[in-house]
Image (cartoon, helix red, strand yellow):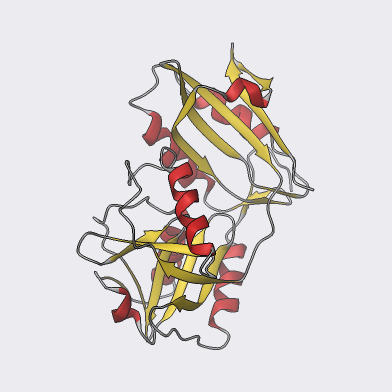
């Protein structure tokens, strides 16, 4: 059973909110991560991304809010918490959602989003979440799990709710760093791990057709690394036996206890 509890930061503490209290609000920034039995991946990168996103929108120091949110996450079970900066009637408000983790998957089917780019702030996670959800829902009608967003030139940028990486032999590749997209913590962690293992990484601007025959990975904080098994009306994809399992294990091994957890 899915459970969500919502809190706002008020007078130096987290205060429970009802769903009706969330009306007339707009999300200015958001960040989420998976916590499994008290451990998570690259929490410092999530913190930095969120703090950077909200630095221009809020005058008070949000560090105490972040610490309180982390302390509120149970150390048992699987959770997918989210921190948000809202604008409510023009005033900023920090929000924490404590959510049970949805079911996770090993693979995904992709489809190209053929409409106009729905993103208004492509480098900031949060403001476009509802629009991206509508995009992902639209491709689900075509049998896909995730929508791929292309640049105006037709190059692969990112998924609606994920980053994309692919293999050229033993070289792990991804879109150019200057592409308009969210800086994915999971993708960055995977690329850093690849370099630590002595593997080459490469940035390239590619069309979907140029990914034909590659092993394509779909990455986000909830699922970690998923393999794209097919692309609706798109390129044929491949899979090297054993590689995905090995990398999912490696990434899981990097998870660390939340601050304040002993053992």
Residue farthest front in this picture: 141
Please give left or right for residue 1 compared with residue 112 in the image: right
Which residue is at 48% across, 63% downward? 139
Residue 71 sits above or below residue 11 on the image: below
Q: Quadrant of residue 191?
A: bottom left
User: Measured from the top left, where is residue 87 in percent x and y?
Assistant: 44, 22
User: Measured from the top left, where is residue 135 in percent x and y?
Assistant: 45, 54
Which residue is at 36% across, 28% downward? 55
Please give left or right for residue 106 compared with residue 92 in the image: right
Which residue is at 56% across, 88% downward? 241
Residue 158 sits above or below residue 245 on the image: above
User: Measured from the top left, where is residue 242 in percent x and y?
Assistant: 58, 85
Q: Nearer the viewer, residue 67 or 58?
A: 58
Please give left or right for residue 231 compared with residue 155 in the image: right
Residue farthest top in this picture: 11
Q: Quadrant of residue 167?
A: bottom left
Please give left or right for residue 229 compared with residue 76 in the image: left
Q: Nearer the viewer, residue 258 or 3?
A: 3
User: Measured from the top left, where is residue 226 in percent x and y?
Assistant: 54, 69
Q: Nearer the viewer, residue 56 or 198?
A: 56
Badge count: 0
Residue 10 sits above or below residue 253 on the image: above
């Amino acid at each position: 059973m899915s459970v969500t509890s919502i809190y706002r930061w008020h007078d130096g503490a987290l205060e429970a909110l009802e769903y009706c209290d969330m009306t007339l609000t707009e999300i200015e920034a958001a960040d989420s991560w998976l916590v499994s039995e008290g451990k998570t991946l690259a929490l410092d990168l999530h913190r930095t991304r969120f703090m950077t996103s909200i630095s221009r929108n809020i005058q008070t120091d949000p560090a105490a809010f972040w610490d309180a949110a982390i302390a509120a996450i149970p150390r048992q079970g699987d959770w997918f918490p989210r921190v948000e900066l809202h604008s409510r009637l023009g005033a900023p408000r920090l929000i924490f959602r404590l959510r049970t983790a949805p079911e996770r998957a090993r693979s995904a089917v992709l489809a190209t989003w053929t409409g106009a780019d729905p993103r208004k702030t492509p480098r900031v996670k949060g403001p476009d979440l509802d629009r991206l959800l509508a995009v992902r829902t639209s491709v689900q009608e075509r049998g896909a799990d995730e929508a791929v967003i292309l640049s105006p030139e037709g190059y692969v940028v990112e998924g609606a709710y994920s980053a994309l990486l692919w293999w050229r032999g033993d070289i792990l590749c991804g879109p150019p760093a200057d592409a308009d997209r969210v800086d994915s913590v999971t993708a960055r962690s995977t690329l850093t791990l690849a370099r630590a293992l002595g593997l080459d990484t490469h940035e390239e601007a590619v069309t979907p057709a140029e990914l034909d025959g590659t092993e394509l990975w779909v990455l986000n904080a909830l699922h970690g690394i998923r393999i794209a098994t097919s692309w609706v009306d798109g390129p044929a994809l491949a899979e090297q036996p054993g590689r995905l399992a090995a990398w999912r294990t490696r990434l899981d091994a990097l998870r660390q206890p939340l601050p304040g957890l002993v053992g």
